[in-house]
Image: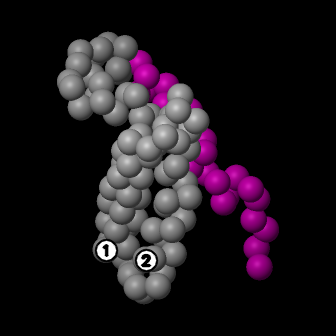
Amino acid sequence: MGYETSFDRHDFLLGTPLWGLGLFMMLLKKHHWGNYPVVYKLGGMILGIYVAHLPIAILVHNFADMLALETYVRDIVLVLGTTIFTLLFVWSVSYTPLRKVLLR
């Protein structure tokens, strides 16, 4: 029943710009890290991945709830499930006529 501010619920947001800036600066210094064929292939799908990951994450979260997963098993299922199903979804859309509309 204590007083809870929005900062208490979202304190992780304070570090997000710092982590983002640090990652950006590190990648500026180590620009050769992204010089791999896998990065080039994912680069063309990055907007689709960004847009599609949230609805898929919600579906995987609901699936984890139905299975009553707990602790680290739930976290592993959420991360791996969202990553794998998002990549599969975007990859499969890239082979349909919807590609021209959805993945510009």
Q: Is residue 17 magenta?
A: yes
Using a 10 Å C-alpha cutoff, classify the residue at mark 2 as few (fewer than 14 neighbours), some (14 to 19) or many (20 or more): some
Q: Position of residue 17 (x, y in %)?
A: 56, 33
Q: Position of residue 55 (x, y in %)?
A: 56, 58
The prevailing secondary structure element of the residues shown in magenta is helix
Which residue occupies the foreground of this view, 67 or 94? 94
The magenta region covers: 1-25
In the rendered image, which quarter is residue 23 located in?
top left
- The amino acid type found where label 1 is placed reads Val
Indicate the colouring scheme.
one colour
Residue extending farthest left: 36
Using a 10 Å C-alpha cutoff, classify the residue at mark 1 as few (fewer than 14 neighbours), some (14 to 19) or many (20 or more): few
Q: Position of residue 18 (x, y in %)?
A: 52, 31
- The amino acid type found where label 2 is placed reads Ala
Label 2 or label 1, whichever lies nearer to me, is 2
Q: Is residue 47 left or right of residue 34?
A: right
At x 55% / y 54%, what residue is drawn? 54
Which residue occupies the foreground of this view, 98 or 36? 98
First in residue order: circle 2 vs circle 1: 2
Which residue is labeled 2 in the image? Answer: 64
Above or below residue 23? Residue 30 is: above
Q: Position of residue 42 (x, y in %)?
A: 34, 33
At x 60% / y 45%, what residue is drawn? 13
Which residue occupies the foreground of this view, 102 or 53? 102
Mark 1, secondary structure of its residue: helix
At x 56% / y 38%, what residue is drawn? 102
Q: Is residue 17 visible?
A: yes
Q: Are marks 2 and 1 in contact (CB under 8 Å)?
A: no
Which residue is labeled 1 in the image? Answer: 73
Q: Is residue 15 left or right of residue 24?
A: right
Q: CA distance from mark 2 to mark 1?
A: 9 Å
